[in-house]
Amino acid sequence: MSMLLEVRNVTKRFGGVVANDSISFQVKAGEIAGLIGPNGSGKTTVFGCITGAHPIDGGEIYFEGAPISRLRVGPIARAGLMRTYQQTRIYGEMTCMENMQISSRDAHGSVFALLRMRARGVETRANELLAFVGLHEKRLHKAGRLSFGQQKLLEFAMALMSEPKLLLLDEPTAGINPTLINGLIDRLKRANEELGVTLLVIEHNMRVIMNLAQHITCLAHGKVLASGTPDEVRNDPRVLDAYLGAQ
Ligand code: ADP
Ligand code: MG
């Protein structure tokens, strides 16, 4: 498998806080990769660096072999690299369908997503994706009236709408009713297998990520602490210490 994403020695500071301290890891085309680590270890910041939301202070990021570290959010999204957010914000008065347009623009600053909405066949695709995430029956509801978990599913469908090559998901199971988590994991796996989307998933729940990812990178204090297969990472004493220390 070739490398779809390569993060090489990336450093990001916020004032005196070194949120990412020379972080390196790779995501192979076709895989589901995991990014774990205690709260505040720098996971969400890495997503901001990769997607162009934060200018980085050091290092390089490559997507499909091309440097993207100096590109802005729009061009990176258009190249096929999308993300979802830890806290989804969907505002009241719009239906699901309308909201896809608003939030795509919101999240990625790109006119491209809006243009796609006007392309032929896009309505069919929107309906298919709403069915895929289990929201088809709610398609005429106002997005702001959906439960938090349903809004996260909608955000997932919105991201899939642009047919990303790589989708970064920031804690997709956070705030989701535990009885619905297995269904969500199943959908993430199907997006990977059936739609061919490579996934990089930030996840706080160890059980979830062990069951989902083929390769996991663990951060602590802004640095890569360990990386490897789920078994290697789960049994790494440094990872156990980092999690226990954070409780
Ligand atoms: P995680 O997602 O692993 O919980 P974050 O990447 O959100 O961690 O945060 C890493 C560190 O960077 C924390 O100390 C956090 O307070 C700090 N941080 C994150 N974003 C910002 C920001 N926009 N401004 C200032 N500090 C930030
Ligand atoms: Mg976070």
Image (spheres, rainbow, N blue to C red):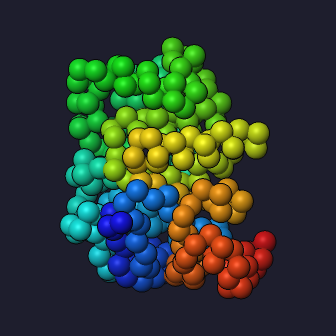
Q: How many marks?
A: 0
Which is more toward the observer, 64 or 20? 64
**Percent from the top left, x then y, of residue 218?**
58, 74
* 111 lies above or below 217: above
Residue under the image location 77 percent in, 77 percent down: 244
In the rendered image, the quadrant that contains the C terminus is bottom right
Residue nearest the observer in this picture, 98 or 231: 231
Residue 169, given in percent of the width and then of the height, sits at 50, 52
Left or right: residue 84 versus residue 108 is right
* Residue 220 appears in the rendering: yes
Instruction: Give the residue at x 23% y 24%.
Output: 119
Quadrant of residue 67 within the rendered picture: bottom left
Residue 17, percent from left and from top: 50, 78
Residue 158 placement (x, y as % from top left): 42, 35
Location of the N terminus (image quadrant): bottom left
As drawn, is 133 to the left or to the right of 60? right
Query: Which residue is located at x 54 percent, y 78 percent?
Result: 227
Going 46% across and 35% down the picture, which residue do you hit?
157
Q: Is residue 206 above or below residue 178?
A: below
Q: Is residue 191 left or right of residue 171?
A: left
Relative placement, left or right, of 10 versus 121 is right
State the image quarter where residue 181 is shown. top right
Q: Is residue 168 visible?
A: no
45, 211: nearer the viewer:
211
